[in-house]
Image (cartoon, helix red, strand yellow):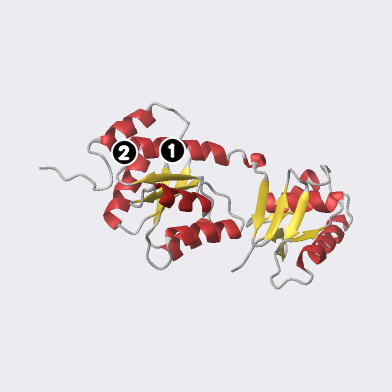
Amino acid sequence: MERTEPHMLPDDKGQAACHAAGKGDMVASMRILVIEDDLEAAAYLTKAFREAGIACEHAGDGESGLFMATENEYDVLVVDRMLPRRDGLSVISALRERGTHTPVLILSALGQVDDRVTGLRAGGDDYLPKPYAFSELLARVEVLGRRKGTPEQDVLYKVGDLELDRLAHEVRRAGREITLQPREYRLLEYLMKNAGQVVTRTMLLENVWDYHFDPQTNVIDVHVSRLRSKIEKDFDKPLLKTIRGSGYMIKYDA
């Protein structure tokens, strides 16, 4: 008798792959990371996603998953809750604190209402209890992948204890309100929107100053210096980094 993967329904993977194959470019450009310590389940998932046309990578424990999710760009993270070295919810919380907003789908044998609420409050975007049908998992991953393409809909940007509320037009760090000038606010908003990534001077000129040429002035350096002073003075951890020869990055280092 043929053995089926323990977390999924029999024959579901093949049906989902055939279904996805007819969708054209919908999933063709997606890249996801599966953080799962069960090597057999991870191999099954990785193979199934690749057959559905999605580039899939795997991390076998929480620490490795956190490192890969921080250092690389993914459209969706699929995270098991019970992981060695660092549990899944801890991984998600650490990513959100560092300003990584990649959509996360939590997989777990813990499927009670309280478990799902805890997972979502930890920073997860979706929660799918085990056992599950791969066709449903694939559909949920596709939905989350489309969501990542519209980061401008985010209302609250957060990097560590620094928060920028786009609706209230307020900036706070550790609960303390920080007053910024309009250009400083736009600069911080753009940096936090791209938290964890290098933002070049050209990107800042085009997106913060609306310049499509280099004015050959130190306007960026002046504003970055003022912003850094306001968001870092009297706080323990620096957030705004100068990447020599490249640009700037805002990032929380635990």
Q: CA distance from mark 1 to mark 2?
A: 11 Å
What is the residue that sits farthest to the left in this orientation? 1
Residue at 52% across / 46% down in the picture? Answer: 103
Residue at 26% of width from left, 54% of height from top? Answer: 40
Asked if the residues shown at circle 1 and circle 2 are in contact, with their CB atoms under 8 angstroms apart, the answer is: no
Q: Dot 2 lies on which element?
A: loop
Residue annotated with mark 2 = 133
**In terms of image quadrants, where is residue 236?**
bottom right
Which element is circle 1 on? helix
| 221 horizontally vs 85: left or right | right
Q: Residues within 10 Å of mark 2 (few under 14, many from 20)?
A: some
Q: Is residue 20 above or below residue 204?
A: above
Q: In the rendered image, which quarter is residue 175 located in?
A: bottom right
Closer to us: 204 or 107: 107
Residue 189: x %, y % from top left: 74, 50
Q: Quadrant of the C terminus?
A: bottom right
- How far across and down, in percent of the image, does residue 197 sit? 64, 55
Where residue 49 is drawn, which disc sits there?
none
Q: Please give left or right for residue 17 compared with residue 206 in the image.
A: left
User: From the image, which quarter does the N terminus lie in?
Assistant: top left
Q: Amino acid at mark 1?
A: Arg
Please report the residue visible at 65 percent of the width from the left and 58 percent of the height from the top: 159
Instruction: Determine crowd level at label 1: few under 14, some 14-19, many 20+ residues with C-alpha closer than 10 A.
Output: some
Q: Is residue 71 visible?
A: no
Q: Nearer the viewer, residue 106 or 246?
A: 106
Residue furthest to the top: 22
Q: Give, as a three-letter code, the residue at label 2.
A: Ala
- Who comes first in sequence, dot 1 or dot 2? 2
Residue extending farthest front: 114
Residue highlighted by disc 1: 140
